[in-house]
Amino acid sequence: MQIGEWKATPHLNRIYGEIRELGLESNVAELDAYGFTVIPPGKAAPMEFVDRLADKVLEVARRRGNGAFESENEYENKRNVGDLVYHMLWEDRIFEEALMNPSALALITYLLGENCLIQSVTGQIKVHTAERTQLHSDNGMIPSPFPPYAQVANATWVLSEYTKENGCLLMVPGSHRYGRHPTPSECEDEESMIPVECAKGSMIIWHGNQWHGAFPKTNRDTIRVNLITLFCRMYLVPQEPLRYEVTPEVLQRNPPRFAKLMGQHIAYGWTDKGPDWTPERQKYLGLTRTPEERLWD
């Protein structure tokens, strides 16, 4: 059907129109039904960009003295989640480009709304892990029961081949509908877990309620590399202080949506002068707006 400028759904008209233009309607259906979806290689970004992104994650990890490179052939990751390279966004402009990827942002916005924030940007490297990563949801400190709508969402760049032997992600399909954290017995129910096997250059997007983990990485012939971009609704506390670190130069060179992901539209955090209620700030917050200007939150 033709999507119109319908007054009842001004926010959804915008984002669903973008989803249709990007050819992501089947991905939305998978998110709704199963809680996760995979964008295939070449659709989200050219492979040349993926190769540069993978090289940059590895470069930063080596420069920081990441443990995985002490002896790549014999090294065993001390944690089953692998070695995490935190706080990557400011390391290189390519991470800003990865954050602003249109396909990922369209699906994240579908899940979290236009006011959502970036929580963290984290590299992940696995050489060898002895056990699978514990089944969990990305809701972290949010207690059960969860609302049915997403409060956080994950967009992960797959920067090496994802197979079960390479320690790929595992999912419990449809678990985003359960509305709670898994129980200890459910964490051991491997019959409910499926491998998310996909090629380098894919992107995996999932609902924050979704139960997931990763299989042990038994293959030592390759390194498993990925980049995790985690997002949240504006009323949650991001994991990294990006809102306070972003510079005017970075904001200027990026689209306006980047500023919103950095939380520049949030008035909370005032001091003795009180909140900033200038007209520009009010418009950002959606407190004075026409239906056409309404922000989806």
Image (cartoon, rainbow, N blue to C red):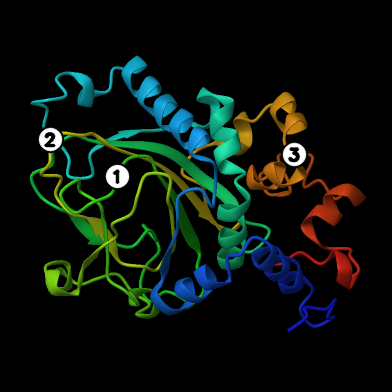
Question: Residue 59: x, y in percent?
Answer: 38, 20
- Label 2 element class: loop
Give the numbered dot on residue 84: none
Q: Residue 185, relative to residue 271: is it above or below?
A: below
Label placed on residue 272: 3
Question: Which corner quadrant of the image does residue 201 belong to?
Answer: top left
Q: Nearer the viewer, mark 1 or mark 3?
A: 1
| 197 horizontally vs 5: left or right | left
- Neighbour class for label 3 at 10 Å: few (<14), some, many (≥20)? few
Q: Earlier in the sequence, mark 2 or mark 3?
A: 2
Q: If you read the primary sequence from the N terminus, does the residue marked by circle 1 or circle 3 appear first?
A: 1
Residue 189 appears anywhere in the view: no
The structure residue drawn at horizontal position 57% and vertical position 42%, both measured from the top left corner, is: 99
Q: Amino acid at mark 2?
A: Arg
Between the residue at mark 2 and the residue at mark 1, the CA separation in whole angstroms equals: 13 Å
| In the depicted structure, whether residue 67 falls above or below residue 227 | above
Taking the spot 66% from the left edge, 44% from the top edge, the residue there is 269
The amino acid marked with disc number 3 is Asp
Few, some or many C-alpha atoms within 10 Å of disc 1 (few <14, some 14-19, many ≥20)? many
Q: Give the labeled residue for mark 1.
A: 161
Q: Is residue 122 left or right of residue 84?
A: right
Does residue 282 lie above or below 161 as drawn?
Answer: below
> Left of 97 or right of it: where is 204?
left
- Of mark 2 and mark 1, the one earlier in the sequence is 1
The residue under label 2 is: 220
